[in-house]
Image (cartoon, rainbow, N blue to C red):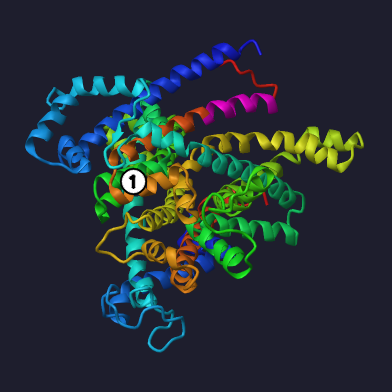
Amino acid sequence: MAGLVPFLAGRMVKAVVILFAIVVLNFLLVHAAPGDPAMVMAGEAGAADAKFVEQLREQFGLNKPLHEQLMTYVGTVAQGDLGFSYRQQRPVWDLIADRLPATLMLTLSAFVVALVGGILLGTLAAINSGKWSDSAITVVALLAYATPIYWVGLMLILLFSVSLGWLPAFGFETVGAGLTGLDRLGDILAHLVLPVFTLGLFYMAVYARMTRASILEVRDMDFVKTARAKGLRESRIVFGHILRNAILPVITVAGVQGGHLIGGSILVETVFAWPGIGRLAFDAVLQRDYQVLLGIFFFSSVMVIVFNILTDLIYTLVDPRIEVAK
Amino acid sequence: MKTSSGFWVAYARNKGAVFGLAIVAVVVLMALFSGVVFPESPWEMVNAPFLPPMSDGALLGTDTLGRDIAAGIAHGARMSLWIGLVSTGVALLIGVSLGAMAGFFGGVVDDAIMRFTELFQTIPNFVLAVVLVAIFTPSSTSIIAAIAIVSWPPLARLARGEFLSLRSREFVQAAITTGQSNLTIIVRQILPNSLSPIIVSASLMVATAILLESSLSFLGLGDPNQMSWGYMVGAARTVIRQAWWMSFFPGLAILLTVLSLNLIGEGLNDALNPKLARKGR
């Protein structure tokens, strides 16, 4: 693990460059938003008299040349200041931080479910290639691939909450139930099931298809024949030899997409009234609260980058041939 | 070169692709004749609200305001197909031109373009699409632009790869020697030879674009003047307990259309890249 430090340093530099570009993009979007930013802010604060607008313009340096404004903006973002929501009368960062645990819980669980489920189903399909279970998994994956994620959520609510009454449909926990300890945990987990499955389903299909294709490619290679010739058990060959090699491209793609789960969480949190960042984004869309929206945009980009670095690290654990350095 | 009948034979060998083509044909007909079959505006309240499917005068029921759901789906087909096709066209224009330049010129140009592409692949694309449409106010134009802006990077990578490998081939070298301009070589020599993978990706991208549009309009970021499937599901979201049909049918329309386009993409792949087609089966 000697190469770890330079590897991380290299990734950090790259991350900072990308983040800078995103901040610039963010800045341009603020200025592209319809109306003069000071007027918009004044409108959001609920007062639009000329004096207040002038004061805002002064306060935020909106009368300075554009490149100076950009530098100021980059400076404030670097200090962790994502702006202020006049509509909610709170700093954007506070709003995001409040919602972060719920979103992390949702997206990370969905990611794990998608990855584990996808790899298992893909493996199952590949070792039964050509049989009915393969066709069934392929058809389900094809359907999951084509179904709008929010519609999956609504249909699951219809089935499991409205018809069967097995699982709660909305919210993070039962409001006013006064549960504590393990009971509360169980309650939250029950609320988590449907959103996690909804968010994970699409990616599960992606990973299942990839795993299947990748295994079919690997399974006729020489080292597999060797393993078979040595008389290893079939399960050992599949999991220890084929899957270990076939899984690499899946992990690469999973890492790239994992951070994008936050995009899907906007839709899922809207459907399930899950109190996370996605729901915050939906409310910001409804209220045209651009500061919050752009803050979420920036923050989710950071999450993608962090996620990519994490995947690279995990990659080295799965495949020790790959050095972290480079 | 394959003959066109050879193409159809290869395409028709994929049963799913034939099914997809049939469904898409129905959707296209629906889009073309929605105005004839349902002459009233789909926004018009034509019946009592909350009518279940198979009611008198409302085959698929009505929504919370008494609008006919079947009419909404027929008119929505127009929006979905239009946005899907045009935004894919714009994404192709951006992606293929950038990818072509990167692959053809190489060096610094390639580096710069690929860094730019990487940036757009890092940004979570659905969040960016939401931000763009919200800021530039929802309209067909802003939706098309947003979808194109978040969809072009894979096309650029694909085109770059194709151009990179074709660039060193003899017919391109010959064209360079005969003094053809770079533009002529890119457009007349290399592009036609790299079309088939690009066509396959484009057909899949139409499906993705339709999904994206439906997601945006589900969030209330659709074109306010056009009926769309995503809007219908979004508007019915809060009454799912009382009225399943309001979100079920429009969602089913999206599912079938997107599924069919994906199947067509696979069929095109089988027909255009016969060598790759049966790999892994």
Tag 1 subunit: A
Q: Position of residue B223 (x, y in %)?
A: 28, 58
Front one among B150 and B53: B53
Q: Position of residue A194 (x, y in %)?
A: 59, 55
Q: Is residue B245 visible?
A: yes
Q: Is residue B271 visible?
A: no
Question: Does B44 sit left or right of A59 as displayed?
Answer: right
Q: Position of residue B29 (x, y in %)?
A: 37, 73
Front one among B67 and A164: A164
Q: Is residue A107 magenta?
A: no
Question: Does B266 sit left or right of A181 as displayed?
Answer: left
* Placement of B22 over or under A323, stated as above or below: below
Which type of secondary structure does the marked residue at label 1 adopt? helix
Question: Does B68 sit left or right of B272 as displayed?
Answer: left
Q: Residue shown at 83%/38% (left/top)?
A: A237
Front one among A297 and B178: A297
* Placement of B94 over or under B105, stated as above or below: below
Q: Position of residue B190 (x, y in %)?
A: 38, 39
Main secondary structure type of the part rendered in magenta = helix
Q: Residue shown at 69%/37% (left/top)?
A: A246
Residue where numbered disc 1 is placed: A284
Q: Quadrant of residue A4?
A: top right
Q: Residue shown at 39%/25% (left/top)?
A: A19
Question: Does A281 sit left or right of A116 as displayed?
Answer: left
Graded by Cα atoms within 10 Å as few (under 14), some (14 to 19) or many (20 or more), the crowding at tag 1 reads many
Q: Is residue A310 magenta?
A: yes
The residues colored magenta run A307-318
Q: Amino acid at mark 1?
A: Ala
Given the current orientation, which residue lies at the most extreme bottom position?
B56
